[in-house]
Amino acid sequence: MKKARIAGTGSYLPKKLMTNQKLEKIVKKFDPVRAGMPFCEWTEKVTGIKTRYYVEDEDTEYMAAEASKKALEAAGIKPDKLDFIIAASFTPSKEIPNLACSIADRIGNGNIPGFVLNTACAGFICGLDDAYYKIISGNYKNILIVASETLSKVTDFNDPATAVLFGDGAGAVVLQQSDKEGISTFPYLKSDYSPDHLEFKNSNIEKEKCFIRMDGGPRVLKKAVNAMAEAAKKALEISTYKLEAIDWIIPHQANERIIRSLAEKLNVPMEKVCLTVDKFGNTSAATIPIALDKAVRGELENYKIKKGDKVLLTTVGGGYSIGAVVLEY
């Protein structure tokens, strides 16, 4: 059986830096009396988020292509060597042509086949799962997995509790056929249907502008922590590694409370858990590949993934979609 490894990573963040101070000027209906503190203090206390990035002249397709170009460059391969593209997003600018087709054209090879998947924040791990099986089948040698989201376009700024969470960005990896195992075993995936806490309706069907709706914050926090912890443990069980052997954990960057609670539940020090939500916000499917790329490139303070490091990725997406994978970089 063939093996698979991550050969290159890339990411893209928009030009516009949105601080909490700037966000305060556009968020409506925040009540400092009810919150018990000013907007900026409340945002950082509740979410841990200090900044995030918003698109200006960029869009989902542009960010995806830019992240993809960096991943290809890091992998040392040209677009004509790609066999397939898997794109993860629920905020593409267009439904047709699909995001994968747009990426193929923008990186210089419009003949690459591909598709788009949507499992919300779990999209990247689900894409990695599909790419893994394609690689080990022996029929594919190089597959691009890219997650790109423009959440600022579907954020309701009349809903402070939701508006503070999200940012825009894209992350990508090239998964490559290899003689040496990089993905330690098949990824673990699970679904747990629960539409009540997080929902995003289709504007084309609803005939009105639709926004992300998130209710029941404490329930979402508990569910996210338990789901990512369970997925992490399952992925470790089917791999050859124990938790103690893992160098880095990169969870979905939903908010800082969830990430710290996950570290506590897994009984691992925060020094081993990658935290980027404070800088980039929640970029949905793109959080993990962005964090992975930044850590590989040494662009994050206190986090530097080196060749041979063992990394655990774990995620949960609204709905819920749940997944985790162990890899050796």
Image (spheres, rainbow, N blue to C red):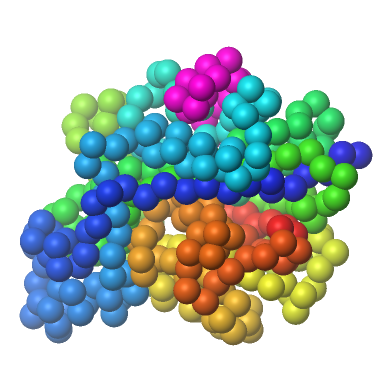
Q: Is residue 317 magenta?
A: no
**Above or below: residue 302 compared with residue 187:** below
Q: Where residue 260 sits: x, y (%)?
A: 49, 78
Horizontally, residue 97 falls left or right of residue 31, namely: right
Q: Residue at x 56, y 81 (%)?
A: 271
Quarter of the view holding residue 18: bottom left
**Above or below: residue 108 compared with residue 38:** above
Q: Where residue 23 sits: x, y (%)?
A: 16, 61
Q: Nearer the viewer, residue 79 or 165?
A: 79
Q: Residue at x 54, y 81 (%)?
A: 270
Q: Nearer the viewer, residue 4 or 210?
A: 4
Q: Nearer the viewer, residue 69 or 234?
A: 69
Horizontally, residue 258 falls left or right of residue 250, namely: left
Q: Where residue 79 sits: x, y (%)?
A: 60, 27
Horizontally, residue 1 falls left or right of residue 109, namely: right
Q: Residue at x 35, y 25 (%)?
A: 94
Q: Which residues are magenta?
A: 103-120
